[in-house]
Amino acid sequence: MLSGKAHYKAKINDRLENLVQIRDPNYKMAVRLKQDPELVALFKHIPKKIIMYYKKMYQLYTKGDWKKAKHGLNKIIKRKRDGPSLFIMEVMKEYNFIPPKKWKGVRDAD
């Protein structure tokens, strides 16, 4: 069983990975992140600079700029292999890091 800092990191990764997997193009992840009291509390332990960098990489991913998203996510993963970053990298890898022609900011549920 995890305790302390490791426990919080695991909780954050699990919750964020679930959010990243939502495939509704109208879903606003930023709103969810601000409204979920548990995530708000967990994010207090992460430097704001890191959170802002991840959000930027997520925005690049949703906008289809996968080259920049891949580069930035690799930087994050080198520091810490977090679930959300790894998940997004896996999605992009499925398409050889080239967004599909009809990319709408989310992965199609096959």
Image (cartoon, grey):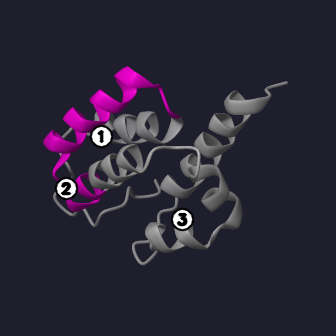
Residue type indicated by callout 2: Gly
**In x, y percent, where is residue 57?**
28, 48
The secondary structure type at the circle numbered 2 is loop
Residue at 63%, 36% (x, y): give it. Answer: 9
Q: CA distance from mark 2 to mark 1?
A: 10 Å
| Residue 75 appears in the figure | yes
Which secondary structure, mark 1? helix
Residue at mark 2: 64
The residue pinned by badge 3 equals 33
Q: Quadrant of residue 106?
A: bottom left
Query: Which residue is pictured at 16% across the width and 51% down the height?
Result: 65
Q: Where residue 61 sits in the image (x, y, percent)?
A: 27, 52
In whole angstroms, how far apart are the C-alphas of marks 3 and 1?
23 Å
- Which comes sooner in the sequence, label 2 or label 3? 3
Of the numbered discs 3 and 1, the one sitting upstream in the chain is 3
Mark 3: secondary structure? helix
Against 49, residue 96 (above or below) is: above
Give the mark toward the camera: 2 or 3. Answer: 3
Residue at label 1? Answer: 92
Where is residue 22? Give x, y as percent: 52, 61
In percent of width and height, residue 16 lies at 56, 50
Amino acid type, mark 3: Leu
Residue range corresponding to the magenta coloring: 59-82
Q: Main secondary structure of the magenta part?
A: helix
Q: CA distance from mark 2 to mark 3?
A: 22 Å
Query: Which mark is first along the chain, 1 or 2?
Result: 2
Residue 57, numbered label: none
The residue under the point 43% across, 33% down is 86
Which quadrant of the view contains residue 62? bottom left
Q: Quadrant of the N terminus?
A: top right
